[in-house]
Amino acid sequence: MASSSSSAVLADLGRSSYVSQRGLADTLRRLQSTGKLSKEETVSRSSIKRAREFEMESHATRFGKICIDKELTGVSGSTLNVTLVNPVSLLVYLLENNMALQQIFVERLRLHPCDYGSKWRLIVYCDEVVLGNALRHQNNRKLQVFYFSFLEFGQGLLSKEDLWIPLAVIRSNKVTELGGVTVVWPQILDPGLLYLHILLS
């Protein structure tokens, strides 16, 4: 892997709008072949993935890695290995690096103190999204995105997408194979969000 800064650039590619990893890697190779991109950096789907993993590793907090691997079990006994967000670690990272989020938390904690007598309430949400052209890719581009937030943010703040923190993104057909969202949710919530609840108690 090259330097951390070049890794960050490679890891951030494709985030402003959807592009397949294969298409992104092909574009980068074409830029290399015309001399518009350094030949020192390896460009492929796997190198982009490695760069993103490297960046995630570098942002670990005292509560561990931001992303963790977990095996989900389906109703028929089938299993699926997925990457989940460690909610405690991600929330700590966001609060340490996002001044606007810090201010929101301070304001809401002032209005709704979080202690043993008045705990903050976790809420969860899931939505299906389709990347790219929905008509051309009806099944393999559909994703189930799982989020969490806090009821104490109030209706106004909860209408803002940025205050719904992602827990996992799993292909919809894989969720269906496991038995549906109701089978996946309990496994995602345990134990990360429960631990977060304890910390806030």
Image (cartoon, helix red, strand yellow):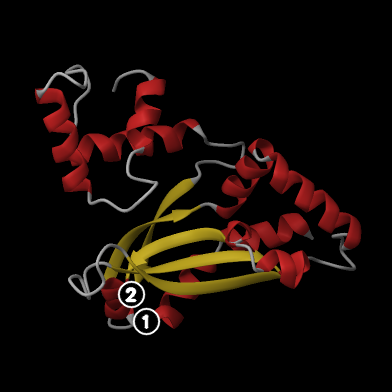
* Residue 191 location, quadrant: bottom right
Quadrant showing the N terminus: top left
The picture places residue 124, in percent across and down from the top left corner, at 59, 72
Question: In this view of the protein, which residue sits in the foreground, 114 or 12?
Answer: 12
The picture places residue 78, in percent across and down from the top left corner, at 26, 74
Q: Which residue is mark 1?
A: 180
Image point 59% across, 65% down: which residue? 148
Mark 2 residue type: Val
Residues at marks 1 and 2 touching, judged by CB atoms closer than 8 Å: yes
28 to 74, vertically: above or below: above
Mark 1 element type: loop
Q: Is residue 89 left or right of residue 52?
A: right
33 to 54, vertically: above or below: above
The picture places residue 80, in percent across and down from the top left corner, at 29, 65
Mark 1 residue type: Gly
Which of marks 2 and 1 precedes in the sequence?
Answer: 2
Quadrant showing the C terminus: bottom right
